[in-house]
Image (cartoon, rainbow, N blue to C red):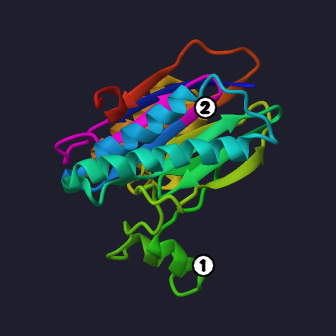
Amino acid sequence: MHFQSVALSDRGLNREINEDSAWIGSQIIAVADGLGGHAGGEVASAIVINRLAKAEKKEFTKESVHDLVIEITAKANGEIAKKIKDSPKLKGMGTTLTSLITTEDKVALIHIGDSRCYQFRDGKLTQLSKDHTLVQELIDQGRLSVEEASAHPQKSLITKALMGNSETEPFIQLINVEPDDLFLLCTDGLSSVLNESEISKILREDGLTEIAVDKLKDAVYKSGAPDNITLVLAKLTSEATHTVGILGAAAVVA
């Protein structure tokens, strides 16, 4: 199985730089949202996305994907830690990561932070990833409703990210897929602005097209685009795609 994808990474209206990064490959797609502002979020997101891009040629199976992903993210964490050691002003930088990797007949979801993975099947949008945030923990504990969470003053507080800590590992899960499944990976610059109904309407109308990508971006812009916006829209195909590339900060950060 291979991915056929369309994607974009955009600075938005209120941020000076784009700290998001993304990779679209034949067997790996991913988005990463850099954390830390002036402390180098764009560096951290570029590190993990470049690590995944280098892994594009590896052979991922249902048996090997877990260990390979742990190895990739451990190396990314090590590189982030070294950057911070060499340049203390970068202390506090980190990145989310949400990725899908194809295996024989399933896809592996790799997730840490608050970027998201959605599956669009039979006209229904389902969030496959679970936010690593304070408000999600409060929801899980029954102390906060989903509606209350959207207005919580600490709704953006992340509880888990790749920040150079060798003990931090992503959530990894094999996902069953069907031929017509559509997947959306996005940073919170999109998911914190558009609700699932708004996203579903666009995917239902336009599917896997540049038009859908542009409509999602335009909808975020109409709501002020307060953050960087990065998204990958993909479906599975039997033929390897030649559309591969790095987007966002990873395309410009050495």
Q: Which residue is mark 2?
A: 28
- Give coordinates of residue 121: x percent, y percent: 71, 42
**Of the residues shown, which amino acid type is indicated by label 1?**
Asp
**Of the residues shown, which amino acid type is indicated by label 2?**
Ile
Residue 179 shown left or right of residue 4 in the figure: right
In the rendered view, tell whether residue 187 sits above or below residue 54: below
Res 210 visible: yes
Tell me, yes or no, whether the highlighted magenta stretch contains residue 28. Answer: yes
Say what secondary structure mark 2 lies in. strand
Label 1: few (<14), some or many (≥20) within 10 Å? few
Q: Which residue is mark 1?
A: 140
Q: Quick one: which residue is furthest to the top in this view?
A: 242
Which image quarter: residue 119? top right
- Give coordinates of residue 54: x percent, y percent: 53, 27
Res 121 visible: no
Residue stretch in magenta: 10-29
Please give the name of the residue rendered at 72% of the width and 14% of the height, measured from the top-left corner.
239
Residue nearer the viewer, 57 or 116: 57
Which image quarter: residue 167? bottom right
What is the C-alpha distance between the residues marked 2 and 1? Answer: 30 Å
